[in-house]
């Protein structure tokens, strides 16, 4: 790269992914709005019934509620802009807008895994220590842990954004349909060693601490379930499988989205390389409210009951 280019810092980026899929832009826009609407509706219903139904004022449902609120914020930073850009034909974003979107998408991703960790620990206590569960995991304890983790995640994500903000950008072609800090690294002129070290340490910390805790809690819970009566075991396993299903979708999608930047994609077209993470991101940010809203019996029954009651009242 020439010295003249090294002194240029861009203020706008081109989202190449939007250009690659513009031939089906209206289709993707409709799908994005539909998925956003369905997810927002299901998330809102989960939050609503958890709020008004006293029988749902328990740690497990509070954690599900917190998770879907995080999903709503994550979706709000992703789907609406994607749909607007596709419908308007706009494929550029300002540096400020890109960093703001990166902040919210990164915050969604990091807080999600910490919430999954708290949920795994909650289920382990509920199954493994049923007599002490309501003492060990109260509603106040759940809310305090969730708030502390959220503040912690805001801090670590903010540090990552500030480290990115100090960089000088020469490239403008962001090979994605939205902004995230990883997609900005190839566009940087100056040294990004500090950013790489920070992200590596953060990723290893989250992976080691959260994944080991989740695996330990899930394995211990399954072992304990095998010793319970058939009815109790079935109920506990069903709840546990719901958590494992939701976490698996999230984990493998995030794993792919992170590793795709270091994998060689020369064997496939740029369009396919963009569409695959586009679909993956959409699934990762939408699956949880649908999974918990459908598979969790208490939530499903309360949602159906409230919808039925509201429909009758309108008529």
Image (spheres, helix red, strand yellow):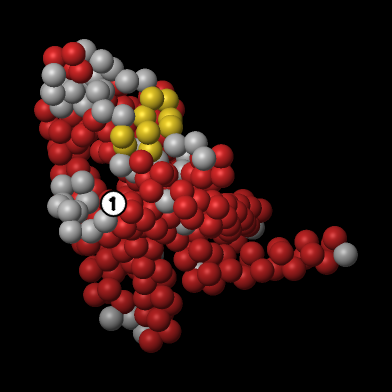
Q: Residue at x 26, y 28 (%)?
A: 171
Q: Which residue is drawn at 64% across and 64% down?
A: 303
Label 1 sits on a secondary structure element that is helix
Q: Residue 135, position in %: x, y?
A: 40, 53
Q: Nearer the viewer, residue 19 or 263?
A: 19
Q: Which residue is drawn at 44% across and 37% down?
A: 91
Q: Residue 92, position in %: x, y?
A: 43, 32
Q: Which of 152 and 195 is in front in this view?
A: 195
Q: Residue 109, position in %: x, y?
A: 35, 45
Q: In which quarter of the image is the N terminus?
A: top left
Q: In which quarter of the image is the C terminus?
A: bottom right
Q: Please say if 48 is above or below 205.
A: below
Q: Is residue 175 visible?
A: yes
Q: Which residue is drawn at 11% across and 28% down?
A: 193
Q: Nearer the viewer, residue 141 or 291?
A: 291
Q: Residue 103, position in %: x, y?
A: 38, 33
């Amino acid at each position: 790269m020439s010295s003249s280019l090294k002194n240029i810092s861009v203020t706008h980026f081109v989202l190449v992914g939007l250009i690659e899929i513009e031939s089906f832009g209206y289709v993707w826009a409709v799908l994005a709005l539909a998925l956003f609407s369905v997810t927002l509706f299901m998330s809102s219903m989960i939050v609503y019934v958890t709020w008004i139904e006293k029988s749902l004022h328990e740690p497990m449902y509070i954690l599900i509620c917190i998770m879907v609120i995080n999903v709503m914020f994550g979706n709000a930073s992703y789907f609406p802009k994607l749909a607007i850009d596709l419908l308007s034909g706009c494929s550029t974003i300002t540096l400020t807008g890109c960093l703001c979107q990166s902040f919210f998408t990164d915050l969604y991703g990091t807080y999600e895994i910490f919430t999954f960790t708290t949920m795994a620990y909650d289920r382990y206590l509920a199954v493994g220590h049923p007599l002490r569960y309501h003492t060990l995991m109260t509603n106040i304890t759940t809310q305090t842990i969730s708030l502390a983790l959220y503040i912690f995640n805001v801090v670590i994500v903010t540090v990552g954004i500030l480290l990115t903000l100090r960089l000088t950008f020469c490239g403008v072609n962001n090979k994605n349909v939205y902004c995230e800090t990883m997609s900005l690294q190839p566009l940087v002129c100056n040294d990004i060693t500090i950013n790489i070290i920070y992200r590596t340490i953060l990723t290893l910390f989250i992976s080691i601490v959260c994944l080991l805790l989740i695996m330990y809690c899930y394995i211990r819970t399954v072992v304990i379930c095998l010793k319970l009566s058939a009815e109790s075991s079935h109920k506990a396993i069903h709840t546990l499988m719901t958590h494992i299903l939701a976490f698996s979708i999230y984990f493998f999608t995030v794993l792919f989205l992170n590793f795709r930047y270091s994998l060689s994609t020369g064997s496939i077209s740029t369009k396919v390389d963009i569409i695959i993470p586009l679909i993956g991101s959409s699934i990762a940010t939408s699956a949880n409210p649908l999974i918990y809203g459908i598979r969790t019996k208490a939530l499903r029954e309360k949602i159906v009951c409230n919808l039925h009651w509201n429909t009758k009242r309108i008529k």
